[in-house]
Amino acid sequence: SLLDFLSGFFELDSNRDYVSSATDTLVDAAAEISPPTVAPDGDGARIGRSHFFVEKICCASEARAINSIVKPLEGVLAITVNTTSKIVYVDHHVDILSAADIAGALNQEQFGCHVKKDAAQTMAQRTGIPTDCFVKSTFEIIEFEKADSVEGFLRTEIPDDHMKTVEIDSVKKILTVHHNPYYLTASSIKKHLESTAIKSSLLSDGGADGMWALSQMSEPVEEILEQHRAIVRWNIILSGICWMLSMLSYIGGKWIYLKYVGLLSVAFGLPPIALKAYRTLRRLHFDVNCMMLFATVGAVALQEFTEAAAVTFLFSISEALESIATSRARNALSAIVQLRPDRASVINPITKQIVVLPASAVPIGTLVSVKTGDKVPCDGCVVEGQSTVDESNLTGESIPVKKGPGSMVSGGTTNNGATQLVVQTTATADQSAVAKLIRLVEEAQTNRSETEKLVDRFAAVYTPIVLLAALCMCTIPWAFGNEKGRAWVMTGLITIVIACPCALIISTPVTYVAALAAAAQRGIVIKGGAYLEAMGSVKEIAFDKTGTLTEGVFALLHFESVSSRSRKEVLEYLTLMESPASHPLSHAIIKGAANEQVKIPKDLSLQNHTLLPGEGIAADIDGKKVHVGNIRLFKRLGYYDELSKTNRDTVEEWAQSGGTVGLISIEGEGITGMFSVTDKVRDESKSVVAALKERGISIKMLTGDLTPAALCIGKQIGLSSEDVKSQLLPEDKVEFIANAVQVNK
């Protein structure tokens, strides 16, 4: 039908209707760091994903044009166009079609395409420490009369692939050695010299800083973060000034001639629009640039110069504002990418010295050094050292987590303790937790919400109907006279201008991308616009207490020994039990004990340290079973009822005041101590809860604390007793959420 024909010609619907779907190809816009893969047919062909930044994408209508240019190229498997960030992802056979060829094909159509990531270069990147690199180290020979035999001795003792050249300056008494730092260090050369009784001093060590390997490695281009900046160009500003001057012609009289200034406004603003329209029409497409060009030319033909200037300037400034919004969204995404570590301090297995490599070049099983303040380059297991690691960029939890031998660490997290960690990598950088976070954020851009789908469907039908109507307005009325024809042409041109749905189409994804990136920067990963939109229909929110509504920073308020053991003895047992634990409460107890000059005892043996979910911890100390935990644990063990009434009243009093109460028992002695810690409510918790309630959202607080302590916290943040769910085990919390989901369906 005519409508179908026009719908195909006026390509204003979303790019995602013309690219491969997420279910049948690698559509993850997030495959930011995807490793090389092998073709499914088993022919050994190398397939990779290249990334391109395409400057001239101004709205969704360019997507089909890009698809029609790239898809026919031999070797292309799939294409994804992200209109908002102006990024095109192409999966292709790298041995058949290069990234430069793809960029060249797009640039032939003046798309302004730049290669951001070349899949072939990524595959060709070396991994591991280079073993064929040579550096220069220099030594001062103190006893130079023996220097004649130096070169011969070194040649005899050191293999040729470890040392390239030896040069001796007899005037300056300087020895220069070009050596392979992977096998041979400058200090080793000095030891070789000393073995022949030649005294020397090291002047420069070519491998000292560990940076020598970087010269042999190609660091990924995508590691260079971009700060995108969009500005309003000078021609648009001049177009706006001329338009405003032309509007003075409406005053009449002598001012009427100012309408010709509108032509200057058109001259300044129209050329970029006309150029885009020409490229679009040459591809037999029709987009918003064509619509604006025809409207402006029509207005000039009717000598409505001020109206022509208005169309030109307002459309130009809207494009500039859209570019600014897009740049901000892209900058937000770049800030997410910044979480990714760029370099790694690898421990040379031969010399044990540090060698600096790009994080993406670190293979699995490598030992890396993570000093204080450094990022963990890849996921791995700690093999040496004890420190704390900041995982807030991945988990949102602000409290550093204690790590020691056997602990797993995630790439992108930061060692903020006082000790170096030695980590053996268990995954490459592109498989790390932070890489997955980046992929999730970028993948979220391709998860379309119902609103986006509705806008696309609406535009596909609405646009051709309106343009057909405008065409009729500009032609049929002329049959009824020139005056009516002129009036209806103006109406038709106005219809073309105001009916364009491009702003509607682009506004939704730009808004979603900005929101998704802003949330991710705050440690919240939302998997796409559909989920973001679904949050608008949330009826109930359940918050965990510790670290969410409270700061998760505990302080030891009370401690009492309730046995024949001294206060110091019981505190020593308590600190020893809590030392391997990572819960914030453990840090509070150890810190509180330290304030009383009680340290973790070295003469006691701790074994079989076990976490008891929802209750506490258990371990063997010098052969005796020791428990530390909440009242639920000791009621289960049958110890709680053995406490005196006075001590039970004290426990109840601490709980009523909002403290988290704990007990410690030693096998054969029963409960030997009791303590209370408190957690400060976050400053913003009360206002956040109040704001959510104002929106009609029901709020619940879930905690394992005793009811009195939980109610005390709930009261501080404005929750009623019905909204506080206390004394819950982890499985109880899961069950509560499952029931709430069923109720609110």
Image: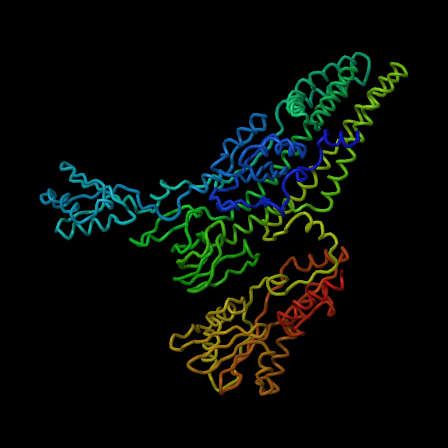
Instruction: Give the color scheme: rainbow, by chain, secondary structure or one colour.
Output: rainbow
**In the figure, 705 relative to 209: above or below?**
below
Q: Which sits in the foreground, 721 or 15?
A: 15
Q: Which sits in the foreground, 221 or 225?
A: 221
Q: Position of residue 427 (x, y in %)?
A: 46, 54
**In the figure, 224 relative to 316: above or below?**
below
- Where residue 147 sits, quadrant-wise, is top left
**In the figure, 447 relative to 499: above or below?**
below
Q: Number of marks in the image?
A: 0
- Extreme-right residue of the structure: 480
Q: Which sits in the foreground, 557 or 519?
A: 519
Quadrant occupied by the N terminus: top right
Q: Position of residue 613 (x, y in %)?
A: 57, 72
Determine if residue 375 is in view.
no
Q: Is residue 2 left or right of residue 90?
A: right
Determine if residue 632 is in view.
yes
Q: Position of residue 178 (x, y in %)?
A: 24, 41
- Extreme-left residue of the structure: 145
Q: Position of residue 407 (x, y in %)?
A: 46, 63
- Residue depicted at x 52% and y 72%: 611
- Where residue 267 sits, quadrant-wise, is top right
**In the figure, 231 relative to 526: above or below?**
above
- Where residue 404 sits, quadrant-wise, is bottom left
Quadrant occupied by the C terminus: bottom right
